[in-house]
Each structure stands twice: as C-alpha cells, then as structure tokens.
C-alpha cells in the first residue's frame, strides 16, 4: 500500500521560526558578514563586449540556400562549406596558444592614465589581488624552497616561443584565456566577444584588439592561396617585363646601328629581334592581365565582417556582484539555520517517542 505524501504544516514552521528566530538571525548575519568579507576583498572587474557577423563562404548558391533553411530549424550546415575554418570553431582559435601569445605585446592603458604598457606586463605587474592570495603565495614560496629545484632547460624569458613557453608565459596565457569569452550563435553565426579586465579602458581596448586579430586571422586563412598565386604571377610578370625591356633595347640598338642597311642577313636579324620583341610584349601583356585578375581574386576571397555592437568602455563593474552575493548568503544562512533546527526538532521528537 502506497504511503500518502504528508502535507506541509506551515503552522509548525512558523512556530519553529518564532521560537528560534534569534538563532536563525544570528547564523544569517554571520553568513552575510563572511560573504561580505570575501566578496569585498575581490578586485572589481569590467567586461567589454563586441558583436560581429562574419561572411561565411558556403560554396554554391544551392548549399547556401540549404544552410539558410537549416538555420531556421536550428541546424548548421556550415561544416560542409569549402572552408576548414567556420564560425563554430572561432572560440577554439581564440583560446589557442598561438593566438594568445600574439596578444602579449598589445598596448594597454588604464582609464586614469597611470598605467601605459603591454598586456604581458599589465597582467604580471599591475593586477590587484585578494588579501589571501599573499598568504597562498607565501606558502608556495616555502613549499618551493623545501622541494628540489626544477631544471631550467635554458628558456629565455625575454623570448616567446609558442612551442615552448616558460612558466610565467604559460601562466599569462591561461590568465588571458580566462579573461576572453567567445560565443557563437549556431543559428545566426553571430560572434560575441567579451574581455574582462580590472580596468574598463583595458577591457574595451583588448576586446577591440582581439576582434582585429581574429579578423586578420580569418582573412589570412581565406586569402592565403589567392595571395600565393598573386605573388607567383607578379614574379612571372616582373620577369616578363625584364625580358620585354631587354628585347626592346636589343631591337632599338640593332635598328640604330644598321640604319639604311639592305643586306638580307641584316634584315633577317632585324625580323628575328622584332619577333622576339613581339613575343615579349604579348607575354608581358598577358601576365599583366593575370596579375589584375589575381588581385581581383584576392579581393573576392577577402571576407567582410559586419560589426553589430562596437566596443565601448563599460561604466559599471561586471563582477563580483557584491549586493547579490551578500543577500544570497544571508538567505542561505537563514534557510540553513532553519533546516538545522527543523531536523534537530524531528530527531528530538523521534528520541522522545522511542523512550516512551
């Protein structure tokens, strides 16, 4: 036989609160004070946001229409495009070591102009920390002094090699990665870039720098083959131009030195030089046209990015949420104390029943 669920007796709960309100209030206030000490010790951070929509290459118009229909029902078919880099993997690009290392030398400046340096120096020397971080650092130093020394392998701190980072460089990479948040809407492919920093101007300038670096990365990838073809054709065109200039000089020099000559040997040589000049002119003309076509191809392959929301200097800190945290801990402390008294009362009643 199934046991019926007992209804909640609010009368007993109110009686429990009224008889133990001092204890509940004391626990709630203590929880609020502890939360206040914790949250007010954390340095405030600001988050700047940029939203942009990239141009996605989907090959033929048919595949583009299929992608549009699939997006309407929440399915993305961009993976079938001719590009190996599509918006869904942009977060992986932004969090890659190669990308993060490229941000080390980005110039940043604080809102009060007291700090003007690169990002690497800003993160290693100009960060506010909670008071307990100094205790943790002191314990780590003691632990390091007692443990055997680690080999140095000859890593130069002044040189950054993404393949082999030093300990400090790796920590800065992880710190930058923790500050960056890249999200992609699977339906619309809209990219949302967020950067969080302890200074609002640093946050805004960094998110803008990340946007530019990501755009350049995608543009370089999309246009790499076209640019290689352009460089190759330009080299051929330059060689053809030199051949044309050489043939033109030889023809002009021969005509000037044999002016008025009617001997057949001289006439044949003149026709030969004239043919060589004509061939050189045609080759140079054709390659010049191919250079223009290759430049147009590079422009065609260069994707465009529509910035939906520009970077602005945030006016209010994004974290920590001090008031919300304190109120939440006050409520949780009160509920915890009430739950403790509730179960304690049930246990007392159970012991009394068993003794009877």
Image (cartoon, rainbow, N blue to C red):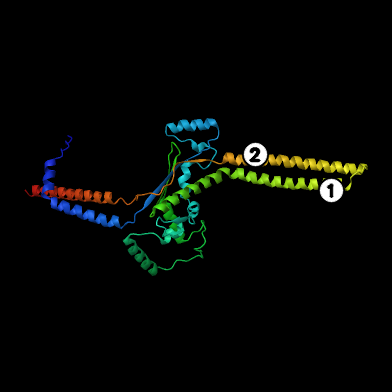
Rendering coords of residue 60 (x, y %)? 55, 32
Please name whichever residue, 105 or 155, is drawn nearer the observer in this view of the structure: 105
Q: Residue at x 62, y 46 (%)?
A: 228
Please name whichever residue, 42 or 23, is drawn nearer the observer in this view of the structure: 42
In the drawing, what numbered circle is on residue 331? Answer: none
Q: Which label lies toward us, 2 or 1?
A: 1
Is residue 69 shown above or below 281?
above
In the drawing, what numbered circle is on residue 253? Answer: 1
Alpha-carbon distance for marks 2 and 1?
A: 35 Å
Is residue 199 shown above or below 270?
below
In the drawing, what numbered circle is on residue 293? Answer: 2
Rendering coords of residue 13 (x, y %)? 14, 44
Where residue 130 sits, quadrant-wise, is bottom left
Q: Residue at x 73, y 46 (%)?
A: 241
User: Can residue 17 be seen here?
Assistant: yes
Rendering coords of residue 147 (x, y %)? 39, 68
Please, which residue is most extreme toward the left here?
A: 356
Give the mark nearer the N terminus: 2 vs 1.
1
Please name whichever residue, 280 or 137, is drawn nearer the observer in this view of the structure: 280
Specify whether 93 is left or right of 127.
right
User: Can residue 178 be seen here?
Assistant: no
Which quarter shows the N terminus? top left
Q: Residue at x 29, y 56 (%)?
A: 40
């Amino acid at each position: 036989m199934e046991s019926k669920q007992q209804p909640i007796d609010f009368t007993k709960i109110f009686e429990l609160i009224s008889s133990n309100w001092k204890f509940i209030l004391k626990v709630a206030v203590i929880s609020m004070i502890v939360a206040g000490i914790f949250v007010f010790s954390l340095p405030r951070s600001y988050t700047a946001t940029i939203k942009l929509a990239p141009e996605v290459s989907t090959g033929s118009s048919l595949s583009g229409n299929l992608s549009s229909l699939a997006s309407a029902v929440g399915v993305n078919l961009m993976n079938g495009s001719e590009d190996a880099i599509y918006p869904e993997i942009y977060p992986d690009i932004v969090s890659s070591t190669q990308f993060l290392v490229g941000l080390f030398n980005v110039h940043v400046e604080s809102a009060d102009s007291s700090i003007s340096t690169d990002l690497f120096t800003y993160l290693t020397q100009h960060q506010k920390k909670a008071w307990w971080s100094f205790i943790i650092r002191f314990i780590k130093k003691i632990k390091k002094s007692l443990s055997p020394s680690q080999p140095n392998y000859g890593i130069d701190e002044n040189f950054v090699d993404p393949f082999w980072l030093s300990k400090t460089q790796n920590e800065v990479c992880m710190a930058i990665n923790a500050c960056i948040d890249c999200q992609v809407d699977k339906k619309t492919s809209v990219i949302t870039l967020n950067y969080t920093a302890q200074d609002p101007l640093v946050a805004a300038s960094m998110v803008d720098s990340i946007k530019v670096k990501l755009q350049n990365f995608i543009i370089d990838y999309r246009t790499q083959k076209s640019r290689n073809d352009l460089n190759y054709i330009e080299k051929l065109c330059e060689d053809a131009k030199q051949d044309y200039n050489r043939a033109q000089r030889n023809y002009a020099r021969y005509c000037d030195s044999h002016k008025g000559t009617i001997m057949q040997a001289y006439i044949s040589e003149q026709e030969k030089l004239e043919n060589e000049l004509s061939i050189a002119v045609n080759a140079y003309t054709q390659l010049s046209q191919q250079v223009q076509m290759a430049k147009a191809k590079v422009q065609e392959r260069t994707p465009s990015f529509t910035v939906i929301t520009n970077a602005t200097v945030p006016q209010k800190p994004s974290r920590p949420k001090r008031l919300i945290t304190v109120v939440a801990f006050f409520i949780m402390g009160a509920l915890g104390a009430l739950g403790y008294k509730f179960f304690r009362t049930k246990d007392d009643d159970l012991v009394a029943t068993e003794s009877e």
